[in-house]
Amino acid sequence: MEQEDLWNRLKAYSKTQAYPFHMPGHKRNFGEMINPYEMDITEIYGFDDLHHPEGLLEQAQKRAAKIYGAKESFFLINGSTVGILSAIASVCQKNGKIVMARNSHKSAYHAVYLNELQVEYLYPEYITEYDINGGIVPEHLRELLEEDKNREIQAVYITSPTYEGILSDIGKIADIAHAYEIPFIVDEAHGAHLYFSECFPKGALTFGADIVIQSVHKTLPSFTQTALLHINHSEFVNVEKVKQYLRMYQSSSPSYLLMAGIDRCLRFMEEQGKEKLQELYNNLYSIYGLKKELKELKIMGDEVKNDTSVYDFDSSKIVVSTKGTSLWGDMLKSRLREDFLLELEMAAPSYVLAMTTLCDTQEGIQRLKKALLQIEKDLTRDNTDRIDRTDMYEGIGRIQNLTSGWGIGRPQIKMTIAQAVNSHQHSISIKESKNQISGEFLYVYPPGIPILAPGELITPEIISYIQELKKSELFLQGLEDEQVEDIKVISV
Ligand SMILES: Cc1ncc(COP(=O)(O)O)c(C=O)c1O
């Protein structure tokens, strides 16, 4: 493979047999080949302007709103990230207060920082069987909103579906938020496909969320960075304010290729989405059929649904658990890449995630099935590794199970994120950081959910968790020290 620069590496990679169980949702398998330079323009006559649309782009956004049943929809060319930043800024005032799920993407934390917000966290249930976060319990929101100290809450924000396909009960959560006249924002970055077929769960706009943000590029055939922000038929959102923030946060030179890509993707979904999603659903049957066959690896399925927090499960996300085996998630991910040329979306300590979309082929899904069967066979045969790895594995398991709800213990918040980031800080070794207040974010990427946010107390549990994670090949990010030896803490 030529490796002298990014362009050549991309070109060479596109010719390999590597199969993508990751984003973007087009799976490099959509549309005809064009020379992108031939169509790349700026705001010239006849092509409208995303920031003041009154022609083609206005019509395209109206079409998107109609497809999704929204009052208004906006094209985003900087991912869901820019939608989340704009949504939170539009409903919260500076120094205001938000209720937010603790398993939110880092962009929501960045919005909290930029708007100097105080946060009350909602903790997802914890699904111990798979070591993943479940959904949000609606009653937990009611309890929070009933507290006197939370009279000033300005928004409720959660992620549904999660990276792993867990959906919360949006209808109930919306009803509770609205009873207190509070707007409800849903990060539906992983759910743009939920509006076209009965085979998959229904999306948050259907259940009354006020602002819904979707990464079109994650689950539909659209270019990386493309996303949508929808405003529902809601009395709780000021559309003009949302527009104002989108103008601030989005590039003043949005790519016409990206915007045309969104429109084209949605037209395709209108015409063929239902049929193609049915095909995907049928193809997935062979993977979920493995559930009974596998004894070592486990595939997560509908059994995670419950009456408390997991309202539904999106089976296009294939979660394969290595819990109780000799493999860590990142080891399984590497094995799938190296021995089977299958590139997965994500590894966590005890599972991997394969993302599927309507652009996956039956052949690709069969390749994954065969690979899992082979790995299962090797695991059943080979017990030597299991003994060597048990201690490390249990280290993670023990720490994750310390509390129900949030695996590493609920953070003790000593100051707001903005106060911490803006305080005097100094660096110390993570090993010696017990009882200090973090000045930095730390997260595993993907998924980009902070383990630690600025302003939170560094506990012994968090220190051991970080040490355990460092033994894996997961990417720990957020700290200035990229070696993850030192952390910046607040100076007193
Ligand atoms: C839950 C969630 N929300 C938001 C985002 C940000 O989306 P984007 O990459 O489109 O900006 C991500 C990205 O992975 C995500 O997983």
Image (cartoon, grey):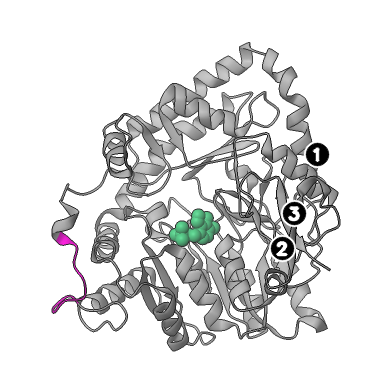
**Magenta: main secondary structure:** loop
Foreground pick, 487 / 35: 487
Location of residue 237 in the rendering, given as x and y in whole percent from the top left corner: 51, 84
The residue that mark 2 highlights is 439
Quadrant, the N terminus = top left
Q: Residue at x 76, y 81 (%)?
A: 150
Question: How busy is the neighbourhood of tag 3: few (under 14 within 10 Å), some, or many (20 plus)?
Answer: many
Give the magenta range.
39-47
Between disc 2 and disc 1, the foreground one is 2
Badge number at residue 398: 1
Question: How busy is the neighbourhood of tag 1: few (under 14 within 10 Å), some, or many (20 plus)?
Answer: some
Indicate which disc, 2 or 1, sits on the residue closer to the N terminus: 1
Magenta stretch contains residue 352: no
Indicate which disc, 1 or 3, sits on the residue closer to the N terminus: 1
Location of residue 242 in the rendering, given as x and y in whole percent from the top left corner: 46, 82
Asked whether the residues under the numbered discs 2 and 1 touch, taking CB atoms below 8 Å apart as contact, a structural biologist would say no
Quadrant, the C terminus = bottom right
Badge number at residue 406: 3
Asked whether residue 413 is in view, the answer is yes
Foreground pick, 441 / 450: 441
Amino acid type shown at disc 3: Trp
Residue at mark 2 to residue at mark 1: CA–CA distance: 26 Å
Q: Is residue 398 above or below residue 438?
A: above
Q: Residue at x 63, y 70 (%)?
A: 172
